[in-house]
Amino acid sequence: MTLTIEKFEPVLREKTTVQRMYINGKWVTSVSNKTREILNPANNEVIAVVTEGVEEEANAAVKAAKDAFYKNGWKTVYARIRADLLLKVASKLAERKEEFAMLETLNNGKVYEDSLADVEDAIHQFQYYAGLATKPHGQTYEVPDEIRAMVVREPIGVVAQIVPWNYPLVMAAQKMSAALAAGCTVVIKPASQTPLTLIRLFEILDEVGFPEGVVNLVLGSGSVIGDRLVNHPDVDKISFTGGTSTGKQIMKDAADTIKKVGLELGGKSPNIVFADADFETAVDYALLAIFAGQGQVCSAGSRLLLEKSIYDKFVPKLVARAKKIKIGPGWQDGTEMGPLISQAHMKSVLDYVKIGVEEGAELLCGGNRITDGELAKGNFVEPTIFTNTKPDMRIVQEEIFGPVLVIQVFETEEEALELANGTDFGLAAAVFTNDGAKAQRVIRGLQAGITWINAYHPTFNEAPWSGYKQSGIGADLGTYGFEEYLLTKQVNIALHVQPSGWYKG
């Protein structure tokens, strides 16, 4: 279809109607009577108004989830019933995938094709975990002393999930589907800026008939709702995706109640290109690695490590292509890069550009807010590339979370690995080379949880998403993500019922 804003706007609800939370099977507004305006980052116009929750709503959601799990029997519901519910969600989401993709683009700023791919991922996640819910996940052991020993896996209980603004729907789907398949109950909080697709997903959850309290949606700020969920004594697990500094605080706060914690945090991921790599492929993926999603991707290849001998050929081609990236609203035909999420985040990214210049790095292209025509209304920043960087520069060490690439140069394989591993992060990494043995050596040496050889960014719901070092603990997706929501219980059964004979008296 030809994309225009007129085709997208019908998916919006009446802008003056306050959109609500979902707690214990009911749609509710906050007792605070506070609301939040939701903006379209491409023009900063109000596209929705949502209720703004406070601690009282967080407490009510946790109570509902606890009652559903312990009193009302969700933990013992037949796995096939849980699976059937998840499959119904997937089916209804598939029927409305264009609607959800349009709404995601309007709320988040993504290019429409990216939003549509996210919705399709979310559909698959519900399908995948529906299948996994009914599969065996226990063990038995042959042991002495006429005992049959076994391990059973049981749902952890009440799970609080906090999702970021860069993948509002797909990250909510991957967390919720895994937790529900495992038999947990859920309280989920979207990012304050991007709640709209998750609100609409809860319409589907309500329609398919999840029991009261099994799924709960609480809207509000991280400092109020997020903090309360982390500190609540009746929450058994926190699953958080977001910034590393927030993740560190969550770990500290969760320690008071010994919660299980899953954290998917930041990155400063290296993309290593050797001289023997396929040149056009490496250039193309270097662009995709950093500029996909406007660089607002935790696994973005924000550090390009180039072998020195190809620097003079590679960099001019890279810069020339970066300057040709078509920037605009995600609903426009041909758009390749959209806006940043907010004016505040745009300022943060531009501040890092200034820091890079002050540190002595050479700015090869970009570095500015776009102020031409209609784009002046939105949060658009040019694709930006720095070179002549040093390992200790802030733009090399710190996550910028925007369309800013820093180039580092190496001469040996050992130097490439030293530079690649030279930050506090370890989320993702890639290597481009036509030498298969070298590729395997470098992958083995990289401290990163998600890696590629001669590609960047494609990942799959069947495989775990996890990080090394300060990029997080635990995993989402795949069987590993499912197991994050299960506890192990050892069960020992005497095969002959008789006294132990231990005591002689």
Image (cartoon, grey):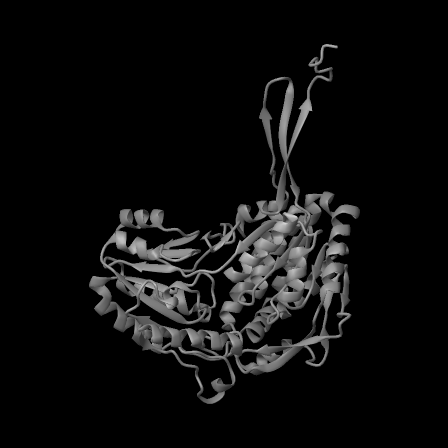
Q: Nearer the viewer, residue 461 or 50?
A: 50
Q: Position of residue 7 (x, y in %)?
A: 58, 79
From this viewpoint, which residue is outermost toward the right?
Answer: 71
x 22%, y 64%: residue: 310
Quarter of the image where one finds residue 302: bottom left
Work out which quarter of the rendered image holds the C terminus and state it.
Answer: top right
Q: Position of residue 323 (x, y in %)?
A: 34, 78
Quarter of the image where one finds residue 188: bottom right
Q: Nearer the viewer, residue 420 or 383?
A: 420
Answer yes or no: is residue 139 visible.
Answer: yes
Q: Nearer the viewer, residue 385 or 278?
A: 385
Side (left or right) of 58 relative to 381: right
Side (left or right) of 223 relative to 416: right
Side (left or right) of 401 relative to 142: left
Q: Position of residue 322 (x, y in %)?
A: 35, 74
x 69%, y 19%: residue: 495
From this viewpoint, which residue is outermost toward the left?
Answer: 309
496 in relation to 346, above or below: above
115 in relation to 466, above or below: below
452 in relation to 315, above or below: above
x 72%, y 61%: residue: 58
Q: Position of residue 173 (x, y in %)?
A: 60, 58
489 in relation to 297, above or below: above
x 38%, y 56%: residue: 429
